[in-house]
Amino acid sequence: MYSKFLLVSILFLSVSSYARQGEDWVNLFNGHDLSGFRQLNGKAKFEFKNNELIGTTVSNEPNSFLATEKEYTDFIMELELWVDPAMNSGIQVRSQSRPDYMNGRVHGYQIEIDPSSRAWSGGIYDEARRGWLYPLELNPAGKSAFKNNQWNKYRIECIGNTIRTWINGIPTAHVVDAETARGFIAFQVHAIPKSEQPGRQIRWRNIRIMTVNLKPSPYDDIYVVNNIPNNISAQEKNEGYSLLWDGKTGKGWRGAGKTGFPEKGWEMKDGVLSVIKNSRGGDILTEKQFSAFELKFDFKLTEGSNSGVKYFVAENAGAALGLEYQILDDANHPDAKMGINGNRTLSSLYDLVPPQKILSSLVRKIGAWNQGIIRVYPDNRIEHWLNGYKVVEYKRGSPGFAELITKSKYKDLKGFGLADQGHILLQDHGDEVSFRSIKIREL
């Protein structure tokens, strides 16, 4: 009798929990018309028909948005969409339109709808503000989630400072960011030029939202873009990241060739570690040595500045030498024009490998924060990343790597760059350069 009662109780609780969760979902549209929404910026056509929101392109109009009159903070939203493969579109979340900002231009987080061969659907873009926060180059597996010429199911979670996206059950993006905590939701029809045929459509259906009893999805293993300074998010911690610089002190670091942290030349203030211009405190390096790892770091340049992040650093006869991720103001520092084919420019493997591609969107303005990644695999493959794009790839110890050494300033250094492990070093080149959010996980 007791076991039967227990079984019935468990079933009742399970059904009740499921019913409550079902009741928490609310349809974003009333099922009849566009009440509760307003159109912003462009004049593309929006209509609600046969339980679908339909957006249609119009020539020579700016991006058009159908926005909720209501603003949202934390929520989970699910929907299905079908898009003409020749279009581009997006879903705005926590977005705003204010007269004091670009005359009311819609700005904020956009979840990408990209049926092109680039395949960045599910990525996160900061519309009319900072640009790409999470290009799908950071998550190659996510590129296969979106399917052309069929309905795709999107899931968007905005909880606290975290925005996560899925397409057809596959995780596509994960951003931790504190720029905007509240705003409207909007559906975009992208602008098209006069030369492009108007009338292409995107259709959304089964659009529902939950704002109470929110429970984040379990952790996955995709890359996390964390824009909160010196912060390790829950998923980053789960993936094995830790702060290499604690954001406050010199703990774990020392001057190159020294036993302690430099007494001058470096400043730690408001969570930022900076080289003081012309103060010559000297390079700093980690007390610990590393072999296979992934290093994330934010850096900020001043005009004409030069610095670098070195790895596999060995200290020999007073010199601290290693492979270098170049940090440079290419436009204003003469080193950018030296070397061979740009192998001394921003994000290069200094004096050895130039960046594979540098798009204008990759290089942020002087004074803005950039995000770098150095990824060293156990098989000696190494990658440099800049603002979400892989720009350098090579394999140390390979015949090609050896040939590059013979043409570089390191040609007379036997075994350069081949140590099994080494320190990580931040360079003091006499110019003001700042660092923050220096994180590492060992692979």
Image: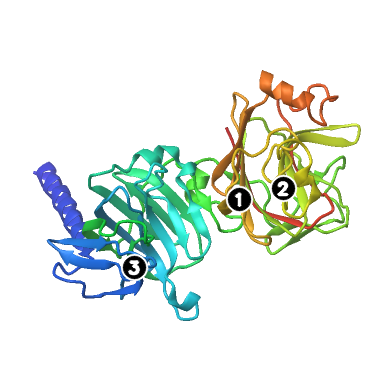
Which of disc 1 and disc 3 is earlier in sequence? Answer: 3
Task: Kindly identify which residue carries mark 2.
Answer: 327
The number of numbered badges drawn on the structure is 3
Q: Position of residue 255 (x, y in %)?
A: 83, 45
Q: Looking at numbered disc 3 in the image, what kind of residue is underneath it?
A: Phe
**112 or 422, which is in the foreground?**
112
Residue lying at the far right in this picture: please name it.
Answer: 317
Task: Kindly identify which residue carries mark 3.
Answer: 65
One can see residue 253 in this view: no
- Report the side of 407 relative to 229 (left or right): right
Residue drawn at 44 percent across, 50 percent down:
174
Which of disc 3 and disc 2 is earlier in sequence? Answer: 3
**265 or 105, which is in the foreground?**
105
Front tag of 2 and 3: 3
Q: How far apart are the two marked residues, 3 and 1, measured between alpha carbons?
A: 30 Å
Q: How far apart are the two marked residues, 2 and 3, measured between alpha carbons?
A: 39 Å
